Image: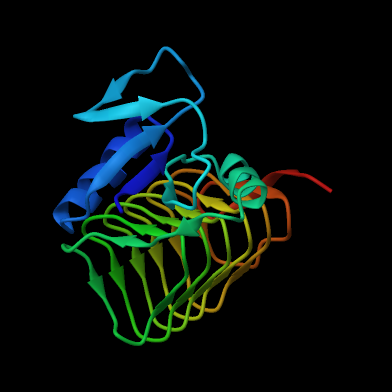
């Protein structure tokens, strides 16, 4: 049985090509936008199949990805890892997560469900990445960093060792994190400072 990708957009294209690199066949994309008929060389369908399918949620928005996963527990969620990534054999990666090209993940890292570890990100030893996190391209996490559920780490962010970042935070592009970040915070700058916090 081939793989289905939920989300026919640019992010979906990248995930499709990771599947192709792994010689994983793709049956179709799923997208509720009926104006979308084809993406790359693949058909776009507009309803969820009735049978159990192999699925990756190919949507960058963490909230939407969680909503789809919760609403569709019946499907078999797969993990895709680009062959041009470097991942320790002592790393744990849960279902639904996608690892892009050029990523380095070192020993003892634990990555949750439905995460995006984007192009050229570096995650050092013993980090813990919770479910529905997006680690953007060229981000660097030093050792023993913890990232809470649903947090989006912006492109080019640097996080020093031992930091804890809370749930559903937004870390702006190029931010340098040198102290812990509470749940729901938006942080920007060097050093990072909180500009907004959702309670």
Q: Position of residue 130 (x, y in %)?
A: 58, 67
Q: Quick one: 121 or 87, which is closer to the camera?
A: 87
Q: Residue at x 33, y 31 (%)?
A: 10
Instruction: Identify whether 68 is placed above or below 145.
Output: above
* 42 relative position to 94: left or right: left
Judged from this view, the residue extending furthest toward the front is 51
- In what quadrant of the picture does the N terminus appear? bottom left
Judged from this view, the residue extending furthest toward the right is 199
Q: Position of residue 199 (x, y in %)?
A: 84, 48
Instruction: Identify whether 36 is placed above or below 187.
Output: above
Q: Residue at x 45, y 43 (%)?
A: 173
Q: Quick one: 176 or 120, which is closer to the camera?
A: 120
Q: Residue at x 44, y 51 (%)?
A: 53
Instruction: Identify whether 140 is placed above or below 154.
Output: below
Q: How many marks?
A: 0
Q: Position of residue 56 (x, y in %)?
A: 42, 50
Q: Which quadrant holds residue 163? A: bottom right
Q: Position of residue 26 (x, y in %)?
A: 26, 44
- Which coloring applies here? rainbow
Q: Quick one: 194 or 132, which is closer to the camera?
A: 132
């Amino acid at each position: 049985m081939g793989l289905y990708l939920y989300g026919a957009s640019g992010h979906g294209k990248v995930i499709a090509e990771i599947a192709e690199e792994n010689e994983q066949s793709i049956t179709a994309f799923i997208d509720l936008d009926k104006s979308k008929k084809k993406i790359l060389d693949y058909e776009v369908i507009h309803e969820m199949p009735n049978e159990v399918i192999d699925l990756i949620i190919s949507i960058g928005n963490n909230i939407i990805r969680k909503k789809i996963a919760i609403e569709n527990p019946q499907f078999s969620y797969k993990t895709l890892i680009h062959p041009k990534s470097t991942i320790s054999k002592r790393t744990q990666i849960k279902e639904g997560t996608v690892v892009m090209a050029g990523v380095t993940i070192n020993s003892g890292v634990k990555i949750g469900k439905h995460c995006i570890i984007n192009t050229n990100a570096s995650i050092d030893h013993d980090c813990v990445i919770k479910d529905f996190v997006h680690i953007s391209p060229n981000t660097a996490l030093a050792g023993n960093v913890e990232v809470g559920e649903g947090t989006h780490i912006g492109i080019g962010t640097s996080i020093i060792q031992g930091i804890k970042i809370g749930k559903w935070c937004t870390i702006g592009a190029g931010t340098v994190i040198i102290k812990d970040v509470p749940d729901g915070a938006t942080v920007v700058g060097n050093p990072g400072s909180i500009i907004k916090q959702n309670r």
